Amino acid sequence: MLRNGIQSWHVIVLLIVVLLLFGAKRLPDVAKSVGQSLKIFKSEVKDLRTDDAPLTDPPNTPPAAQNTVVPPPVVVQTPVVTPDRPEPTEGSAPPKA
């Protein structure tokens, strides 16, 4: 007697039905594909569990460098000067007339 009220004759009837549905020639292929599917499923579940694990510090990073804040790069804009009317910039000489 198996668990949950399933008796041994239930299993035998189930195996006979499966044998009739798939045939004796296709059963090894069906078993192989089910095994591969279970293997892929187990690896995906394992990957999901490792993705949820807390991240650890990188092994070669010194502790002081982990909490440093890097400032954003400074963007310098140059003034636009048209060729017909140049405008002086700060620190340059005025144009000669």
Image: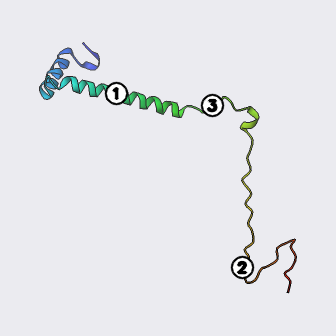
Q: Secondary structure at mark 3?
A: loop
The circle on residue 56 is: 3
In the drawing, does residue 6 fall left or right of residue 74?
A: left
Q: Position of residue 79 (x, y in %)?
A: 75, 72
Image quadrant where residue 56 sits: top right
The circle on residue 82 is: 2
The circle on residue 46 is: none
Display coloring:
rainbow
- Pointer 3 or 2: first along the chain: 3
Image quadrant where residue 1 sits: top left
Kindly identify the amino acid type of the residue bearing the numbered disc 3.
Thr
- Disc 3 to disc 2: CB gap under 8 Å: no
Whole-Å distance between the Cαs marked 1 and 3? 30 Å
Whole-Å distance between the Cαs marked 2 and 1? 70 Å
Q: In the image shown, does 15 or 85 lie closer to the viewer? A: 85
Residue at the spot of label 1: 38
In the drawing, does residue 6 fall left or right of residue 94?
A: left
Kindly identify the amino acid type of the residue bearing the numbered disc 2.
Thr
Kindly identify the amino acid type of the residue bearing the numbered disc 1.
Leu
Q: Position of residue 96 (x, y in %)?
A: 86, 83
Name the residue: 23% across, 19% down. 6
